[in-house]
Amino acid sequence: TDPIEEEQRQANAASVQAEFRSTAYIIFADAEWKKPKRLKSHDAYWDVADDLVGSRAEKLALRHRYGAADLDALRHFFVDIVGISETLERAELEARLRVPLRSDPREETGWSEGLDLGDFETIVAIRTGPELLLDEPSGPHEGA
């Protein structure tokens, strides 16, 4: 290829990657979610490592969100052009789960931005009550 064309192609790819990093353009929905998900490129991944096959993380992989007919073209677009991670490894998943997946304030919109911890793990409801709150108990204190 012509060096000038290659330079222009690389500049275009860098521009696309920067846009997908800064704006949540990757959109998908699931019957289990109240709202569709909007992801930035650093939130998304194409597939999972072998030891994550069968996990919720596999269900979230873009490879499993599209029809099988165009997988090669879609993989090329998302991995080579957009710049998402090709394979989510267990260590990367564990790192994602150690830090908040979202830190921006919530807005009431028709979309969910990014992924939640609940997308990767089952969250069990914890019983709450007055004994778990910081309110003063109504009865006398021991030792008072």
Image (spheres, rainbow, N blue to C red):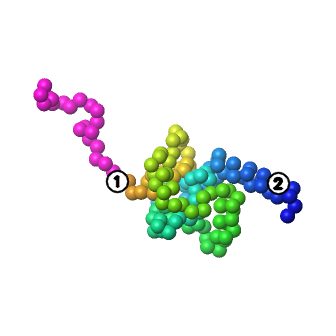
Residue 33, percent from left and from top: 48, 56
Residue 119, percent from left and from top: 46, 56
| Residue at the (66%, 60%) spot, across then down | 78
Q: Look at the image and give the residue range highlighted in magenta.
A: 125-144
Residue 8 appears anywhere in the view:
yes
Q: Is residue 86 one of those drawn in magenta?
A: no
Q: How many marks?
A: 2
Q: Is residue 127 one of those drawn in magenta?
A: yes
Circle 1/circle 2 CB separation < 8 Å? no
Name the one closer to the observer, 132 or 29.
Answer: 132
Mark 2 element type: helix
| Residue at the (47%, 67%) spot, across then down | 51
| Residue at the (50%, 48%) spot, across then down | 101
Residues packed near mark 1 inside 10 Å, few (<14), some (14 to 19) or many (20 plus): few
Q: Amino acid at mark 1?
A: Val
Q: Which residue is mark 1?
A: 124
Q: Which residue is mark 2?
A: 8
Q: Is residue 77 left or right of residue 100?
A: right
Q: Residue furthest bottom?
A: 69
For residue 44, which quarter of the picture? bottom right
